[in-house]
Amino acid sequence: MADKQYDVSAKEKRLVETYAKRRLALREEYIKQITNPHRHGAGEGGILFDSGIQRFMSMRATEYDHFRATPKTSLYGLCSIVLPMLAFGYLLKTSRDAQEHKYRTGQVAYKDRRFKFI
């Protein structure tokens, strides 16, 4: 009774177990094929060709050949690169200007100024 789950129905549990068994079987077959020392005798060579991995690697190699600037990609670049830099620069400038104003108006004593940079 320790493995009884109340938030999962019996049908969902069977589906998950079936998926796990199928995944384990595919994984074992892949490992068996990849580590077979007699593959060279069949003329197959020493690698296992996986079309999905090959498509992914080809896509990564030619990513910039097929890139096209759109408003969405431009906005993404603006929001992820330019705006954070500008916001950090503004924050840095305003905090340093406020500190400098305190120094110039005498609100901070000379002895407290040393190594107190923001």
Image (cartoon, grey):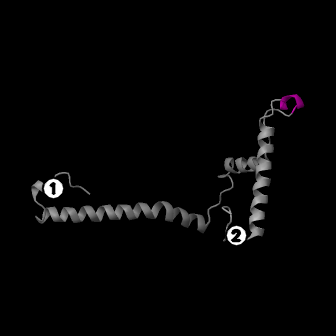
The stretch of residues the image draws in magenta is 38-43
Mark 2 Cα-neighbour bin, 10 Å: few <14, some 14–19, many ≥20? few
The amino acid sitting under disc 2 is Val
Within the image, what quadrant is residue 36 found in?
top right
Q: Relative to residue 48, is residue 93 depicted above or below?
A: below
Give the numbered dot on residue 113.
1
Would you say residue 1 sits in the magenta stretch? no
Determine the main secondary structure of the stretch shown in magenta. helix
Q: Which residue is mark 2?
A: 8
Q: Say which residue appears at 73% left-offset and 71% top-offset.
A: 9
Residue 30, how many percent across, how many down? 78, 43
Apparent side of residue 102 relative to residue 41 in the rendered image (left or right): left
Q: Quadrant location of the C terminus?
A: bottom left
Would you say residue 41 sits in the magenta stretch? yes
Q: Relative to residue 75, is residue 49 depicted above or below?
A: above
Callout in the foreground (2, 1): 2
Residue 97, how many percent across, how many down? 24, 64
Q: Quadrant location of the N terminus?
A: bottom right
The amino acid sitting under disc 1 is Arg
Q: Relative to residue 27, is residue 96 depicted above or below?
A: below
Dot 1: element: helix
Q: CA distance from mark 2 to mark 1?
A: 63 Å
Which of marks 1 and 2 precedes in the sequence? Answer: 2
Dot 2: element: loop
Residue 90, how many percent across, how many down? 34, 64
Apparent side of residue 91 relative to residue 74 in the rendered image (left or right): left
Residue 27, how many percent across, how many down? 76, 47
Q: Relative to residue 97, is residue 47 depicted above or below?
A: above
Q: Say which residue appears at 67% left-offset and 67% top-offset.
A: 5
**Residue 109 vs residue 1, the one in the foreground:** 1
Q: Say which residue appears at 55% left-offset and 64% top-offset.
A: 76
